[in-house]
Amino acid sequence: MRASSKVVRSLPTKNIAKVLNCIPKSIAIRCTRTIAILFLISRALPATALLGPRTNAPASAPVPPAPPLFDDLDVASAELGGWLLADIARRRSELVALGWLARTYRFAAPAFGLFAPAVFRVEPYDYGGLGGDGGDALFRWHADGKSLECVVCESSVVARGVPIRLRLRMGSGSDGGEIRGAEVVAVGCDIAPTWPPGSVPVEAKEARAICSRIDRGGRRMIAGAVSRAIFKTLEPHLADVLGARTALVTSGDAVDFSPRHDLYAREGLNKKWLQRVSGYYFAESRIRDVRFDNGRDDDIRFTFYFDPTEPPNSERIGMNVNPEVLCCKFGSITVIDGYMNAD
């Protein structure tokens, strides 16, 4: 510390100015944005948030055995139980990070507008095009015409975007088309989604118009929905079930996923046909939902994806995690109102 301080003090001021003037403007702007975002997050985060998720379970508590997940997954139940919990923990960390970004955005939306305008700017996934994402099927009106479910892309953190499935409550009468409330249905790639009976697909033009309305005045509403889903629903649930070492159980039958032939490429250790879904590529596989058997119908589920052509793996570097959590489904969450006018 002393040596470095001495070096800094010995540098002539005019030389420092010359160095700073040589930094390209674009890099300077990016650095300023990064510093500003980190400062805002540090102000919004409690000190305990940096220590990771907490549970009440002792470190030596045994891991519950896994349920029979897939017929062709040849891993001992006790070992598989640890694998499933490890991947849920990885996804939990990612969701908590997204939640803190949402909470910080609501805390300082004007600052984000200046320094990081792409945060919580949502857009529909590709309609058609190479690989296509099935965009025309990812925005659907409920049969009553009052609610709309959609999968949007939030790409400020991950280049390919984080898929967020929303349920939007739309206005009626004189404010028809305005978004009055939102709830998060799922986060992650749901490669075999189910939709409400009688729902009607939305055309690409209307889907883009809905995203434009969110960007003009509803980003805090979406950020509030994400924050509430993670910190008011998911985190209390996981703290409860993980602290009690609650066992996982399957929810529904395994579903076979047969991809369109969008791209033939290496995925994992082998080349295979892949289908693009929400910006990501998936091979022929099997998927299944699991939940924690806590005696309550919390309806929080994790969708696991298993590629039978790849070796089972949880921790080995250089290999795909298999099976892997693709999506966290929240079920029914209280609709959030009132943030539309807060921007």
Image (spheres, rainbow, N blue to C red):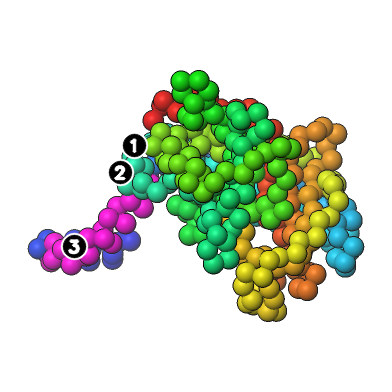
**What secondary structure is found at the residue carrying circle 3?**
helix
Q: Residue 228 lies in what quarter of the image?
A: top right
What is the magenta segment's predominant secondary structure?
Answer: helix
Q: Amino acid at mark 2?
A: Leu
| Magenta span includes 20 | yes
- What is the span of residues highlighted in magenta in the rendered image? 15-39
Give the position of the N terminus as an image quadrant.
bottom left
Q: Amino acid at mark 1?
A: Pro
Q: Nearer the observer, disc 3 or disc 2?
A: 2
Q: Which residue is mark 3?
A: 20
Foreground residue among 339 and 110: 339
Q: Amino acid at mark 3?
A: Leu
Specify few, some or many for label 3: CA neighbours under 10 Å numbering under 14, 14-19, or 20 or more: few
Residue 50 visible in the snapshot: no
Q: Label 2 vs label 1: CA separation? A: 7 Å
Residue extending furthest toward the top: 173
Q: Which residue is mark 1?
A: 110
**What secondary structure is found at the residue carrying circle 2?**
helix
262 horizontally vs 308: left or right: left
Seen at 62% across and 72% down, the residue is 263
Seen at 69% across and 76% down, the residue is 272
